[in-house]
């Protein structure tokens, strides 16, 4: 008669392609019951946005098929996002498992567009997601969500994020009165506002908090990197960036600060011809890939140049909501899954470092 040990050693042959570890040692098999050849367990993925969820599930079914003596098999598939940040050092934001800063070397490359649509794509997989518009000088998220009139309440000295399309949003733009004065604020005040948005907000339980940063390497990206432990930075580039080397400067700053780089994403990469449906790389191909190769940062995706994306943002109707089956939305979805996978990889690394320290002490 087949026993639990045999089942587990068979399942240990299934490797998570992202984490490169077997699913048993990663603790992904939960609530296993085996009674008289009737096998039941839960497969707990590290993120609901796992790009390999179908493959892992199929590999598990195949492994179970290869076992002798299983009469019945039931599997539930769930996901529990791993903590991609060192939470001990940061009890104030202990309910937020991952913080992802979205940065770029220069302005106008699409950070806000990418941040918002990534947040929506992750939320659509079932993850709990927040979006912090950290562009205090020029907040654009309220307009992109069509929520210019919304405002944040304060409850028990904590800011209450605004709910929109299943995500929790904080932006300086929700303080309509103050927002137009932001241009006159200097570094320390701006840093103080960002700190408050991070730690004095009632984020509740979040799997991913996306932080839309202003361009470059100024006070705000620096404050994010130095105030709290974050999972890492996602760098947005456009094909033109490679020649001007601005992305490289931003990457250099985060490297110096020892902040992990989650990935590089190329926006306005190509144009899909409405007549022939072909991708045209009008500004040249492979720029972000080159950055990814030379700095060993994962390449997480490329988003097309598409008037629907721009019009959606201008009208407060993001493409992930209004046109979720479009090729642009599909490209964003793929990037979101890759970002989530990279967060799981960083979380697994963090976990093994912590376990290593405990074992050594
Ligand atoms: N993939 C895309 N296709 C077409 N238009 C886009 C795309 N991505 C962004 N845009 C448009 O480009 C402009 C700049 O985008 P966005 O505001 O997201 O950039 P940003 O990097 O956040 O800018 P800033 O540095 O000023 O914060 C906006 O008008 C936006 O609608
Ligand atoms: Mg922006």
Image (cartoon, rainbow, N blue to C red):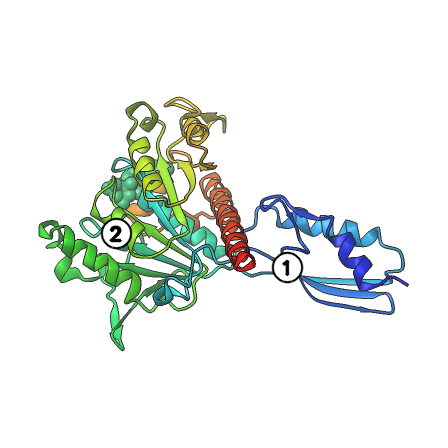
Q: Compared to 300, does 221 lie above or below? A: below
Q: Residues within 10 Å of mark 2 (few under 14, many from 20)?
A: some
Q: Which mark is residue 142?
A: none
Q: Quarter of the image holding residue 290?
A: top left
Mark 1 CB near ligand 1 (8 Å cut): no
Q: Is residue 321 visible?
A: no
Q: Compared to 219, does 179 lie above or below? A: below
Horizontal side, residue 254 vs residue 60: left or right: left
* Element class at badge 1: loop
Q: Quarter of the image holding residue 359?
A: bottom right
- Residue assigned mark 2: 223
The foreground one among 11 and 201 is 11
Mark 2 CB near ligand 1 (8 Å cut): no
* Element class at badge 2: helix
The x, y position of residue 275, in whole percent, is: 47, 27
Residue at the limit of the structure toward the front, as seen here: 361
Q: Residues within 10 Å of mark 1 (few under 14, many from 20)?
A: few
The x, y position of residue 155, in whole percent, is: 27, 76
Horizontal side, residue 75 vs residue 184: left or right: right
Task: Name the residue at 58% across, 44% down.
Answer: 18
Task: Name the residue at 87% across, 69% down.
Answer: 36
- Residue assigned mark 1: 27
The x, y position of residue 108, in whole percent, is: 26, 37
Horizontal side, residue 241 vs residue 182: left or right: right
Q: Quadrant of ligand 1?
A: top left
Alpha carbon distance from label 1 to label 2: 35 Å
The x, y position of residue 106, in whole percent, is: 26, 35
Q: Compared to 351, does 114 lie above or below? A: above
Looking at marks 1 and 2 on the same chain, the residue that comes earlier in the sequence is marked by 1
Task: Name the residue at 89% across, 60% down.
Answer: 69
Horizontal side, residue 262 vs residue 148: left or right: right
The foreground one among 128 and 91 is 91
């Amino acid at each position: 008669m087949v026993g639990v040990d045999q089942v587990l050693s068979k399942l240990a042959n299934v490797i998570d392609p992202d984490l490169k570890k077997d699913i048993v040692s990663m603790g992904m098999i939960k609530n296993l019951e085996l009674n008289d050849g009737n096998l039941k367990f839960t497969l707990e993925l590290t993120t609901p946005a796992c790009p390999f969820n179908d493959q892992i599930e199929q590999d598990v079914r195949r492994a179970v098929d290869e076992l002798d003596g299983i009469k019945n098999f039931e599997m539930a598939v769930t996901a529990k996002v791993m903590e991609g940040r060192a939470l001990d050092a940061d009890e104030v934001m202990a309910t937020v498992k991952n913080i992802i800063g979205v940065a770029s070397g220069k302005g106008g490359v699409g950070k806000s567009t990418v941040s918002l649509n990534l947040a929506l794509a992750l939320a659509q997989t079932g993850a709990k997601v927040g979006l912090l518009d950290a562009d205090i000088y020029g907040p654009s998220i309220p307009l992109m969500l069509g929520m210019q009139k919304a405002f944040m309440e304060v409850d028990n000295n904590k800011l209450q994020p605004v709910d929109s399309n299943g995500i929790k949003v904080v932006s300086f733009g929700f303080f309509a009165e103050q927002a137009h004065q932001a241009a006159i604020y200097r570094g320390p005040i701006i840093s103080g506002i960002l700190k408050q948005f991070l730690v004095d907000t009632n984020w509740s339980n979040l799997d991913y908090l996306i932080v839309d940063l202003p361009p470059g390497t100024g006070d705000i990206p620096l404050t994010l990197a130095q105030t709290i432990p974050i999972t890492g930075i996602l760098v947005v580039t456009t094909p033109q960036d490679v020649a001007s080397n601005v992305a490289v400067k931003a990457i250099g700053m985060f490297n110096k600060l020892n902040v992990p780089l989650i990935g590089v994403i190329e926006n306005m990469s190509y144009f899909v011809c409405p007549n022939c449906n072909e991708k045209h790389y009008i500004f040249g191909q492979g720029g972000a890939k080159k950055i990814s190769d030379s700095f060993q940062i994962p390449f997480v995706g490329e988003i097309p140049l598409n008037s629907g994306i721009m019009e959606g943002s201008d009208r407060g109707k993001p493409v992930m909501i209004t046109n979720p089956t479009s090729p642009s939305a599909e490209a964003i979805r793929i990037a979101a899954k890759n970002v989530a996978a990279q967060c799981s990889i960083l979380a697994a690394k963090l976990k093994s470092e912590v376990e290593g320290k405990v074992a050594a002490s």
